[in-house]
Image (cartoon, rainbow, N blue to C red):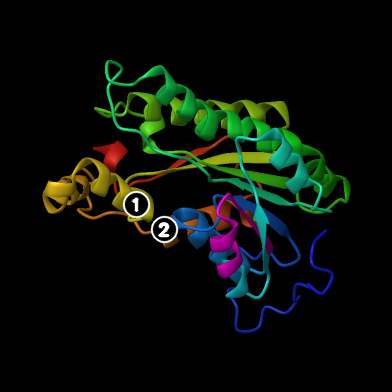
Amino acid sequence: MTDPTFSASSSVANQDPVFRLDGRHALVTGGASGIGEATVKELVRAGAFVWIADINVTAAEALADSLESAKALHLDVTSPESIAAAAARLDRLDILVNNAGIGHVGSIETTEPEDFDRLLSVNVRSVYLVTRALLPLLFAATERHEAVGAIVNIGSVSGMVGIKQRFAYCMSKGAVLSMTRQLAVEYPKTLRVNAVCPGTVQTPFVEGYLEKFHKDTKDQTRAELRARQPVGRLGRPEEVASLVRYLASDEAAFVTGSLMTIDGGWTAA
């Protein structure tokens, strides 16, 4: 159950007048770090109550303690049992952000079957499992004659273009984008489903990649990552979070089935 003491303020004094989410309940998977953490903070800032769903519940609790309207929720997105237990704690849900994911470096020749299966499980199957389990709560938001339930999937430009040495990752993010469009068409009047497709963003995810695969050439590789985005820099998690906030808001009521790039011009070049 959600925190009974929580009550979103209806006042917007000294707050942003648009893209408000007052009274809405959201859940962000992988919400304890990176883009997920930034998204949690942005949705709370917009007036929502947010469940920080993460396998690292200690980090989720630390983040929740720093915010006024958030609670930590242990969630292993690859486990149907964990998802069911998490869903049982919710009594309502208006916004779902499928953010949890992992990366992988390798061509088809160097991607082992266990690597491929892991990417499918964490990046693709989890979106199916979590969304399916929480659909009844999202549908209930519409039945209350409030805003239509909103799903925002965190995709990637990797799902839209080919990137060398990202065989399994490109495959997994391409699947997320396909699911986004299918769900939007399947439930056009009861759900709004969109995907955000970031380019390379400065997160612990990227730093971990640099440490693992380019430990001796970090500065050079980081410069290459910046250069492939025409604006000449990496994205910031907060920038992605702002787009998620918009897509979850009433101002985006006519937006569904969209794959929105936020990539410093990468896919335009």
| 116 vs 62: above or below | above
Residue 202 locus on image (x, y percent)? 32, 56
- Regarding residue 189, the answer to whether it shows in the image is no
Check the picture and name the quadrant holding the N terminus: bottom right
Secondary element at tag 1? loop
Q: Secondary structure at mark 2?
A: helix
**Drawn side of residue 201 relative to residue 193, left or right:** left
The answer to whether residue 244 is left or right of residue 226 is: right
Image position of 183 (left or right of 153): right
Check the image and report above or below for 174 versus 29: above
Residue at horizontal 53%, vertical 40%?
A: 195
Q: CA distance from mark 1 to mark 2?
A: 6 Å
Q: Residues within 10 Å of mark 2 (few under 14, many from 20)?
A: many
Residue that mark 2 sits on: 237
Of the residues under marks 1 and 2, which one precedes in the sequence? 1
Q: Judge left or right: residue 232 versus residue 262.
A: left
Task: Identify the magenta region.
Answer: 49-62
Residue that appears at 47% across and 57% down: 33
What residue do we see at 56% from left, 56% from top?
246
Judging by the rendered image, the residue that carries numbered circle 1 is 201
Q: Amino acid at mark 1?
A: Val
Residue type at tag 2: Pro
Tell me residue 82's x, y (percent). 70, 41
**Which of these two is toward me, 168 or 170?**
168
Q: Position of residue 223 (x, y in %)?
A: 15, 51
Asked whether 51 falls inside the magenta stretch, the response is yes
Q: Are marks 1 and 2 in contact (CB under 8 Å)?
A: yes
Q: Which quadrant of the figure has residue 198?
A: top left
